[in-house]
Amino acid sequence: MKSFYITTAIDYANAGPHLGHAYEKVLTDVIARFKRLQGFDVRFLTGLDEHGMKVQQSAEKKGIEPQEFVNDIALEFLALLKQLNISNDDYIRTTGERHKVVVQNLLQKLHDQGDIYKDYYHGYYSVRAEQFVLEKEKVDGEWPSIYGEVVEITEPNYFFRLGKYQDWLIEHIKTHEDFIFPKSRANQVLEFLKEPVNDLCISRPRERLSWGISLPFDEDYVTYVWFDAVTNYLSAVAPGTPENEKYWPADYHVIGKDILVPAHSVYWPIMLKAGGIEPPLGFIVHGFWTMSGKKMSKSEGEIVDPFDLIEEFGPDAFRYFVTREMNVGLDSDFTLERFMIRYNSDLANDLGNLLSRLLNMTHRYCGGIVPTASVREEPEAVLLENWGKVQEEVVGLFDGFRFHTALERIFHFISSVNRYAETRAPWKLAKSDAAEDRQRLETALACMAESLRLVAIVLTPVMPDVCERINGLLGTQGVDSWEGNLDWSERMEGNALGKAAILFPKTR
Ligand code: ME8
């Protein structure tokens, strides 16, 4: 079985989860679930980025040890994964021993071969951003406020020879078309690489930052936050263990647009190249969620807490909303109004209503058993043609990470099934004594049942719980693979349907 390794960014343990974190998990989960249905042996990793100055400072403020601080935060992130029904196979924490070993081995190798060297660093350092900043970044003589306090320091540190591998990276990006999705982001990286990249300062003196992994060749230093963080993708499939090694190189790292350049697209591939390890096959770079047009932040005033929505409307409504609204790669705005429109119109009125109509009418007219479809007239022809279009496109859209379009097409089809039910109007046909009308009625219910069977297959990666409930009510099993299961069929005939159920209750 072909393996497929996908990862999310590991979340900073300096604060609890927000909508952006939730979104990235859902997006990656949709891909992981889809790939499993395509027959891949999937390994899906997510985790927590626990070292660094901010965590050390946050813990100090609370008067607790950093480890205790991150342990509490880990519980919040793990609860989020559970609430959202995320199917990750592993969860890595950068304070774990398995991670430390891999980071130190890589550092040691790069040091031994002369790619890491000691030198003086003189520069301006932003405490908040935990990075050195450049004079040219000043705006009107002031440091941008995102940097907070900036201090001037000179200190001996360790550097990684990034520049040595710059030409290789440029060539690699140019010759690997699928390295960065969406493609426009690859141009952004190439633009960055037009200037010579400086060697990267990868250490902090332990006296200033104690919360980190020690350099194996100099105990007075801990490693720089990015060197520690990005390596998690490798440490989770620890080199040297055959059952894990097959997952490297990773197929995709799913990350937000803020951490592509330079951390993921420059530092990480070069670290691997220098270490003699294959780079990942690709990055999926998503955009940002804003809230009512603003960057999400509690200080900006009233905000809608997405976790209240998960609790009130269920994980699948949330999963559907974010997947339907976000065109992967672009930004999207989160408003309660939009959420309610999607919930009421797509989920409750279109999908939920279709199911309850089917269940009600099948019990009323056919004893709860899916009848035979024996008529093929114009309304059926239109319905099948509509499904044919979804069937033709849906795999390609999922494969191309165009989930919002896939969901648009699927819900277009669901609307068309509701229109079909209106056209056939089984409640009117039931009043007729003509044999053909009885056949039309039975055909209508059979076609609605078949449509829902198919819909529950293609929606599974996005709404796993809801689809399982639909399958239960249809008397069908979920499928292990889409292959061969997306053809319009008669396989629902004779199924005993469950009693009417409301999938998406009106809560407001
Ligand atoms: O960057 N909308 O952690 P993080 C969408 N620890 N995505 C968002 C977002 C938003 N409003 N805000 C953040 C880090 N994200 C590092 C990563 S990986 C080796 C280390 C995304 O907690 C962000 O782009 O700040 C990133 O992909 C992820 O959430 C974690 O962000």
Image (spheres, helix red, strand yellow):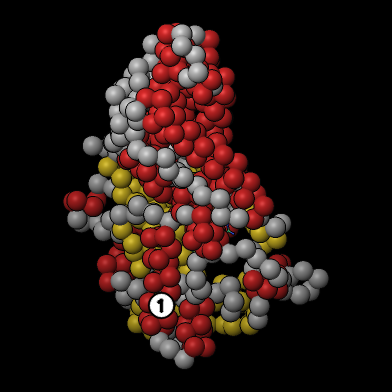
Q: Horizontal and vertical percent for residue 491?
A: 31, 22
In the image, residue 6 lies at what x, y percent? 38, 49
Q: Amino acid at mark 1?
A: Asp
What is the quadrant of the N terminus in the image?
top left
Q: Position of residue 169 (x, y in %)?
A: 48, 48
Name the one closer to the observer, 503 or 192. 503
Horizontal side, residue 481 vs residue 303: left or right: left
Residue in the image at 57% along x and 82% along y: 154
* Disc 1 residue: CB within 8 Å of ligand 1: no
Q: Nearer the viewer, residue 47 or 157?
A: 47
The structure residue drawn at horizontal position 26% and vertical position 58%, both measured from the top left corner, is: 238
How far from the left and from the top, in percent, is residue 217? 32, 76
Q: Residues within 10 Å of mark 1 (few under 14, many from 20)?
A: few
Seen at 52% across and 63% down, the residue is 307
- Foreground: 252 or 343? 343
Residue found at x 41% / y 25%: 365
Which residue is outermost to the left? 242
Q: Which residue is mark 1?
A: 72
